[in-house]
Amino acid sequence: MRVFGLIGFPLTHSFSKKYFTEKFENEHIPDCVYELFEVETLRRINFDKLKADNPEVAGFNVTIPHKQNILPLLDRFDSSASLVGAVNVVKKEGEEWVGYNSDYYGFMESLQRFLPTDFKGIKALVLGTGGASKAVEAALHTLDIPYSLVSRTAISGIQNPVLGYDELTSAIIENHQLIINTSPLGMYPNIDTCPALPYQSITSNHFLFDLLYNPAETLFLKKGKAQGAKTQFGLEMLHLQAEKAWEIWNQ
Ligand SMILES: NC(=O)c1ccc[n+]([C@@H]2O[C@H](COP(=O)([O-])OP(=O)(O)OC[C@H]3O[C@@H](n4cnc5c(N)ncnc54)[C@H](OP(=O)(O)O)[C@@H]3O)[C@@H](O)[C@H]2O)c1
């Protein structure tokens, strides 16, 4: 039996458990189980206990609030985890526990499918500076897409300033044809909220990507679509990051 699972807290609504349990059934993958390891504080003793209690664990996902505080407990990282500075997939490789970041791969793949092949020259605005934003930043860096961050806490006077929402002029929106929402604004049940952008400046030349997947069309995407922009929501990324985790565990 190979045991996979998810470490996080709280774990009331786990996409991953449902996804992998259905995958094992539908694809007739034998002797695999996906379990929830609800762990509030990730001290070394807890992690050691988890490993000791579950010798058949082959790998696991990591979610909020442990994507960063698991780093010192791991033996090695692949380039995705190093680039992002956070881990959401762990694989047991021999005696070593190795950290990966499949959000990075999932976002990059979904973005490449969404953008036209001649996207060189496009600039991005990334809304929000949390954990998911770090994976987005790393992917944009890899794809050589220049970007600016937008936050409720603007930081000026540095080489790469972080813009405040009240600084977003029409000229800035026109100059950034790709806008990526990594904030939770618009997520169910708060579907009537959206990032504070001058939406009237969005045109049919724009590409709006929302990491949220519930609802399928957030207010952010709705408003962009009304201006003629192309839109993409986060479900494909969610599936791609899960499939990447499966690939990592089996390679
Ligand atoms: N589709 C996928 O596969 C996928 C993968 C990962 C995450 N996600 C989704 O992405 C979202 C963000 O995840 P996360 O882990 O980055 O969450 P997070 O760490 O809580 O960060 C979200 C960021 O959004 C901004 N923000 C939060 N509340 C806000 C508000 N009321 N108004 C404006 N900005 C606000 C904050 O940035 P500032 O403080 O800089 O404003 C915050 O750091 C979640 O909803 C998650 O479900 C989707």
Image: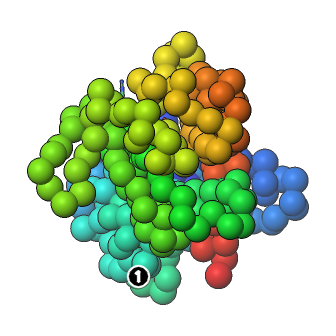
**Whether residue 184 is situated above or below residue 190 in the rendered picture:** below
Provide the secondary structure element on which disc 1 rests: strand
Residue linked to disc 1 = 96
**Whether residue 83 is situated above or below residue 226 in the rendered picture:** below
Residue at horizontal 55%, vertical 48%?
A: 177
Residue 60 visible in the picture: no
- Specify the farthest residue to the bottom: 94
Closer to the camera, 136 or 21? 136
Closer to the camera, 107 or 63? 107
Ligand 1, seen in the image, is in the quarter at top left
- Side of 52 relative to 61 (left or right): left
Q: Amino acid at mark 1?
A: Glu
- Side of 116 relative to 127 (left or right): right
- Specify the farthest residue to the top: 192
Residue at horizontal 12%, vertical 50%?
A: 157
**Whether residue 164 is situated above or below residue 234 in the rendered picture:** above
* Residue 36, percent from left and from top: 53, 46
- Side of 212 relative to 50 (left or right): right
Screen quadrant of the N terminus: bottom right
* Residue 196, percent from left and from top: 41, 24
* Residue 31, percent from left and from top: 75, 65
Closer to the camera, 73 or 146? 146
